[in-house]
Image (cartoon, grey):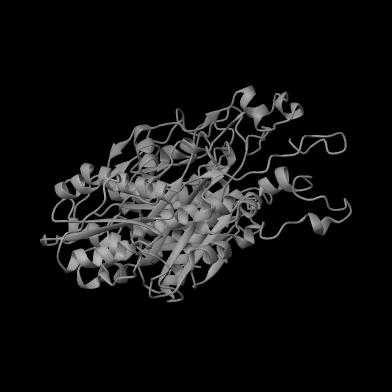
């Protein structure tokens, strides 16, 4: 499948929680700084996670991973979950829900008031929480041991991830579970983009999520790195190390995004999907022809020359054979598309920073590429010392950047990146990403402007106010009209409310005090604001005008909703291993 509609797709919203990074800003800072976010677990931490002695004392066990703190916690009340229901729900679903909401807020849209159908395309890994914590746990069910169906809990499968999101967020467009292993989330992005291009929806959420624990063994020729580090394209690579994370993007047709005044992070120029078929050494082995076909088709659909691409965010699984086939496939596609130079295009993998995030790995790479083309920086790929001798890097169009480098652009040479993901089993996804179009300057408009804020609880509202105040202090030149428009038209009105009416940023900073009682003052804007704070639904369209901009997202009030794993017993010796 490829983009055959001629529609370019805008990325207008971003959200992620990844190892070492609670949000997109922290993720980018870590990438630019070359931070290794893979965690080396202590024996005490592993015991606390329930790793059994049989695995813990095995020399082949790899005690490392991309750790995601707080995976046990969730703002259940915000999404309408009861405590018991939340505790039984796959934490992958919970993470995806929060990321989906945050991404929509970043885009400046409330799905409850969006005029068209909103789709959701999501990929999830194996539900290990169900396997290790819930299945057969007396704390969950005392069903007859022979009643296997009675042990299966509702809504636990990956199939329900998009439907759960559509239900909780109120999305009425296509809701598709996308399962293609490690390429799942990037495949979800391709399907979402195609759905937009085919006018099956007008806005789309796409991404993936994975939750795992450090229960992996290294085997010679296997997928797990002996030293717990992914050394993509390096001669010493022995595999990857797995981790947890979630990433979601909001997509929209570029023409519509520009017409609606949306903030565009980047543009998807083209995409393609393929499978390696039977032309490979085995089911788990990657294929040369399938990866070449996906890359070549994406370039052709995007109508760009391979020599225009400045960065390839590769799959980079860290295995000698897998990386070699990937580089050979990319080289074939690039040469066929006219690339003549050697070592002209950067090749890296986010797996070196955060580990292999399985179903979420593709969208993590996409978010990295989106930020790179937007910011004009190519982050370093970590743990690279000597090229994999089987990959042929020295004669390829690619080089592995070991330091973060500037990536200039001008009107004639836009920044372009390619993102590729290869799923175990041979399913490949390839996406071409372009820097965002320049946003026309807008004339500053005089106030007064309302700044309405709301939350599901008083604590969250206080955090909302402080987050906006900090944002304005850090962005003194922001157009307050855009802030007002985004808050009024792009955020859901919740129960607990606070608002101020002001003329400029300095006044807004002074008035945003959660301890004070807001007094909007006289006038039409003030009266609407007063009515809104009393809980009335008001029509802001007559008093706000501006463009949507990324603003701080909702401060989820997470608490622990978790069922601990049952202790290992003689008749169930592998429950914690």
Along the line of sight, the residue nearer the viewer: 409 or 122:
122
> In the image, residue 376 lies at what x, y percent?
27, 45
Camera-nearest residue between 105 and 243: 105
Q: Residue at x 48, y 53 (%)?
A: 98
Tell me residue 78's x, y (percent): 49, 55
Residue 90 shows in this picture: yes
Asked if residue 219 is positioned above or below residue 172 in the image, the reply reads above
Would residue 276 appear left or right of 198 to someone viewing this image? right
What residue appears at the point 64 percent right and 23 percent down from the top-left corner? Answer: 43
Along the line of sight, the residue nearer the viewer: 485 or 69: 485
- Identify the residue shown where x is 69% and y is 39%: 564
Q: Residue at x 35, y 32 (%)?
A: 33
Q: Where is residue 58 in the image (x, y as percent from the top left)?
A: 73, 25
Asked whether 222 or 541 is in front, the reply is 541
Total labels: the figure holds: 0
In the rendered view of the protein, which quadrant contains the C terminus? top right
Q: Quick check: can you spot residue 292?
A: no
Identify whether 418 is placed above or below 201: above
> Is 181 situated left or right of 503 in this image?
right
Residue 418 screen position, x and y as percent: 40, 53
Q: In the rendered view, would you say 317 is above or below 529?
A: above
């Amino acid at each position: 499948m490829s983009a055959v509609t001629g529609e370019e797709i805008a990325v207008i919203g971003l959200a992620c929680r990844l190892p070492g990074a609670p949000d997109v800003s922290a993720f980018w800072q870590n990438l630019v700084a070359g931070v290794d976010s893979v965690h080396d677990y202590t024996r005490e931490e592993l015991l606390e996670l329930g790793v059994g002695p049989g695995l813990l004392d095995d020399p082949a066990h790899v005690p490392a991973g991309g750790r995601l703190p707080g995976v046990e916690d969730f703002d259940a009340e915000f999404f309408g979950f009861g405590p018991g229901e939340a505790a039984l729900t796959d934490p992958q679903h919970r993470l995806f829900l929060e990321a989906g909401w945050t991404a929509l807020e970043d885009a400046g849209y409330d799905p409850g008031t969006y005029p068209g159908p909103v789709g959701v395309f999501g990929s999830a890994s194996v539900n290990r929480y169900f396997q290790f914590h819930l299945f057969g746990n007396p704390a969950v069910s005392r069903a007859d041991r022979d009643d296997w169906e009675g042990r299966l809990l509702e809504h636990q499968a990956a199939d329900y991830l998009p439907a759960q999101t559509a239900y909780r967020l109120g999305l009425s467009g296509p809701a598709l579970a996308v399962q293609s292993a490690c390429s799942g989330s990037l495949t979800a992005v391709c399907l979402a983009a195609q759905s937009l291009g085919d006018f099956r929806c007008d806005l789309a959420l796409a991404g993936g999520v994975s939750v795992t624990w450090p229960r992996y063994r290294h085997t010679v020729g296997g997928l797990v790195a002996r030293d717990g580090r992914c050394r993509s394209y390096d001669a010493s690579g022995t595999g990857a190390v797995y981790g947890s994370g979630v990433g979601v993007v909001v997509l929209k047709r570029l023409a519509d995004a520009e017409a609606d005044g949306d903030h565009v992070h980047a543009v998807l120029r083209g995409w393609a999907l393929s499978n390696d078929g039977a032309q490979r050494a085995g089911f788990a082995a990657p294929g040369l022809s399938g990866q070449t076909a996906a890359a070549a088709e994406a370039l052709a659909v995007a109508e760009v020359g391979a020599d225009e691409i400045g960065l390839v965010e590769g799959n980079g699984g860290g295995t000698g054979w897998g990386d070699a086939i990937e580089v050979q496939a990319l080289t074939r596609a690039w040469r066929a598309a006219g690339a003549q130079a050697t070592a002209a295009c950067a090749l890296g993998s986010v797996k070196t920073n955060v580990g292999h995030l399985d179903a979420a790995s593709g969208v993590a790479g996409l978010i990295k590429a989106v930020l790179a083309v937007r910011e004009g920086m190519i982050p370093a790929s970590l743990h690279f010392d000597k090229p994999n001798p089987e990959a042929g890097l020295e004669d390829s169009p690619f080089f592995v950047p070991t330091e973060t480098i500037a990536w200039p652009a001008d009107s004639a040479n836009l920044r372009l990146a390619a993102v590729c993901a290869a799923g175990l089993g041979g399913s490949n996804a390839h996406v071409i990403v372009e820097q965002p179009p320049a946003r026309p300057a807008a004339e500053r408009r005089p106030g007064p402007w309302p700044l309405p804020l709301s939350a599901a609880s008083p604590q969250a509202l206080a955090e909302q106010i402080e987050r906006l105040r900090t944002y304005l202090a850090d962005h003194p030149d922001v157009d307050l009209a855009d802030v007002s428009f985004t808050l009024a038209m792009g955020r859901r009105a919740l129960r607990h409310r606070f608002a101020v009416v002001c003329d400029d940023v300095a006044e807004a900073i002074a008035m945003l005090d959660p301890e004070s009682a807001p007094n909007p003052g006289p006038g039409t804007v003030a009266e609407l604001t007063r009515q809104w704070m009393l809980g009335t639904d008001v029509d802001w369209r007559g008093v706000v005008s501006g463009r949507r901009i990324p603003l701080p997202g909702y401060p989820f009030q997470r608490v622990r909703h978790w069922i601990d794993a049952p202790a290992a017993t003689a008749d169930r010796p592998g429950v914690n291993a």
